[in-house]
Image (cartoon, grey):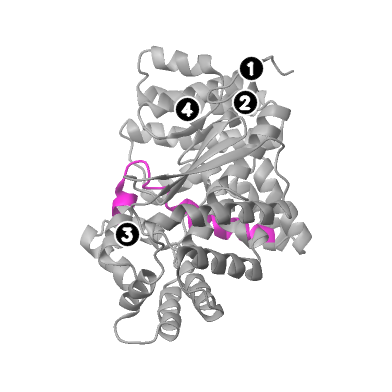
């Protein structure tokens, strides 16, 4: 039986009084965030739980790891719904792993990643690097290495800072409209996009609850039309905003699963969330629509907008996207193989065709305590969810599976098991 509704943090929407399992899950995550700042990516749950954690004495991470184990044992007995039980089990495995790491327990890096994301880290096949270099040689004629030519090509497409706002204001309604033709949105959802600076990322979705998101774009970094189009889709429709809004309405509001009112970094839900945000535009922006929106963005930005220019950008982007998992390879080199930082930077420059500055930033990202595992959620999540949707058997069935990603408590291992069962 569900409890009464209580005020939410960050918005006017009401959330259910948590059952004992959800309450203790929320408390555990809020307490661990005090040791792993940034672990809580969003919280719109009951205010009294947040206030309680803020006022109590700091609980040591070793004790929090024990709390996670004890709660997992309770979940197996007290949670009747199989999907909820599995989701909580895998989330708690990740929280136990993070708490134990803070307490000084060292796991082999691949095991740490697997426990955090409920998925085994995968490398980019070596042949893919060679294939991408060969293809870019064809797409980028002229002197210099493929990396140098790619950097020069990218420089041609930087949107002047004073035109970024205008491009965003034209693209976002078009992206939303294209998404709504495939996937509905909860009534009353909304978001706003802001331009910020002095941040380590290019774009970020801050979910406030009440079906509302804030999306920030970092203007310190070069912003290019195609990357902006893809980033907006990733962060808004049918990406993070649409997912969080649907899960608030379905999981928290309708099913009374208050544990979904907290969003946690370095857990299996991120593997699913980043994967669907990367995958989503495949369903909403068909090649013709994507090319049309890219031409519109270039026109507003005052950049070349011919069909040839647009097709060239799209071809280069598709080629480079095949190396999306190179950051994970870099992380494995650093943390699993013990390779020197300079060797990893050289690998990213030579094989992944990054500029030295970008390669350095990538290594900095995977060395950060919060992000050292997170890098696998993008390419790994997209690959797993893409295989699962493709295996559905028809475009309509694939869209139905994607909508499940937006609305249900699914886990990477559960999705992988469905794939394995379907191919048996």
Relative side of 384 to 344, left or right: right
Quadrant of the image occupied by residue 21: top right
Alpha-carbon distance for marks 2 and 3?
Answer: 39 Å
Circle 3 SS class: helix
**Marks 3 and 1, how far apart at CA:** 45 Å
Marks 3 and 1 close (CB-CB < 8 Å): no
* Residue pointed to by mark 3: 333
- Say whether disc 1 or disc 2 marks the residue closer to the N-terminus: 1
**58 lies left or right of 254:** left
Q: Nearer the viewer, residue 212 or 270?
A: 212
Q: Mark 2 points at which residue?
A: 258
Q: Which of marks 4 and 1 is nearer the N terminus?
A: 1
Which of the marked residues, 3 or 1, is nearer the chain's N terminus? 1
Residue 53, above or below 161: above
Precedes in sequence: disc 3 or disc 4: 4
118 drawn magenta:
no
Query: Reading the chain from its start, which is encountered first: label 2 or label 3?
Result: 2
Can you give x and y, in whole percent of width and height, for residue 357 in the image?
26, 61
Q: Residues within 10 Å of mark 1 (few under 14, many from 20)?
A: some
Give the labeled residue for mark 4: 29
Please state if 200 lies on the left or on the right of 356 as rendered.
right
Which corner quadrant holds the N terminus? top right
Q: Where is residue 37 in the image (x, y as percent from the top left)?
A: 36, 32
Residue under label 1: 17
Q: Is residue 4 above or below residue 114?
A: above
Give the extent of the magenta segment: 363-389
Q: Residues within 10 Å of mark 4 (few under 14, many from 20)?
A: many
Q: Distance between the residues labelled 4 and 1?
A: 17 Å
């Amino acid at each position: 039986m569900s409890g009464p509704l209580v005020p939410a943090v960050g918005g006017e929407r009401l959330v259910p009084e948590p059952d004992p399992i959800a309450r203790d899950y929320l408390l555990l995550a809020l307490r661990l965030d005090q040791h792993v700042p940034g672990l809580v990516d969003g919280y719109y749950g009951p205010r009294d739980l947040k206030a309680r954690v803020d006022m109590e004495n700091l609980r040591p991470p070793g004790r929090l790891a024990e709390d996670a184990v004890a709660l997992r044992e309770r979940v197996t007995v007290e949670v009747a719904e199989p999907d909820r039980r599995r989701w909580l089990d895998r989330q708690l495995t990740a929280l136990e792993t993070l708490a134990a790491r803070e307490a000084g327990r060292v796991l082999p890096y691949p095991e740490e990643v697997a426990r955090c994301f409920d998925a085994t880290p995968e490398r980019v096949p070596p042949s893919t690097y060679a294939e991408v270099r060969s293809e870019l040689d064809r797409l980028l004629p002229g002197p210099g290495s493929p990396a140098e030519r790619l950097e020069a090509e990218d420089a041609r497409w930087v949107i002047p800072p004073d035109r970024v706002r205008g491009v965003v204001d034209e693209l976002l309604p078009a992206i939303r409209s294209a998404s709504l033709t495939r996937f509905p949105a909860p009534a009353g959802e909304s978001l706003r996009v802001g331009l910020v600076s002095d941040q380590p990322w290019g774009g970020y979705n801050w979910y406030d609850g009440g079906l509302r998101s804030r999306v920030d774009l970092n203007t310190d970094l070069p912003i290019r039309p195609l990357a902006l189009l893809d980033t907006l889709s990733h962060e808004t429709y049918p990406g993070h905003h649409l997912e969080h809004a649907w899960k608030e309405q379905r999981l928290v509001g309708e099913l009374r699963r208050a544990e979904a009112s907290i969003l946690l970094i370095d857990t299996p839900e991120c593997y699913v969330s980043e994967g669907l945000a990367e995958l989503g535009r495949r369903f909403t922006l068909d090649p013709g629509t994507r090319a049309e929106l890219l031409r519109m963005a270039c026109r507003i930005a005052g950049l070349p907008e011919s069909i040839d220019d647009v097709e060239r950008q799209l071809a280069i982007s598709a080629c480079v996207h095949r190396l999306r998992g190179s950051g994970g390879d870099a992380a494995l080199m650093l943390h699993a193989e013990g390779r020197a930082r300079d060797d990893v930077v050289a690998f990213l420059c030579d094989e992944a065709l990054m500029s030295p500055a970008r390669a350095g930033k990538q290594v900095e990202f995977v060395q950060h305590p919060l992000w050292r595992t997170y890098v696998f959620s993008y390419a790994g999540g997209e690959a797993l969810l893409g295989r699962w949707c493709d295996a559905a058997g028809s475009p309509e069935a694939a869209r139905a599976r994607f909508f499940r990603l937006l609305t249900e408590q699914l886990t990477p291992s559960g999705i992988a098991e469905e794939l394995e069962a379907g191919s048996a």
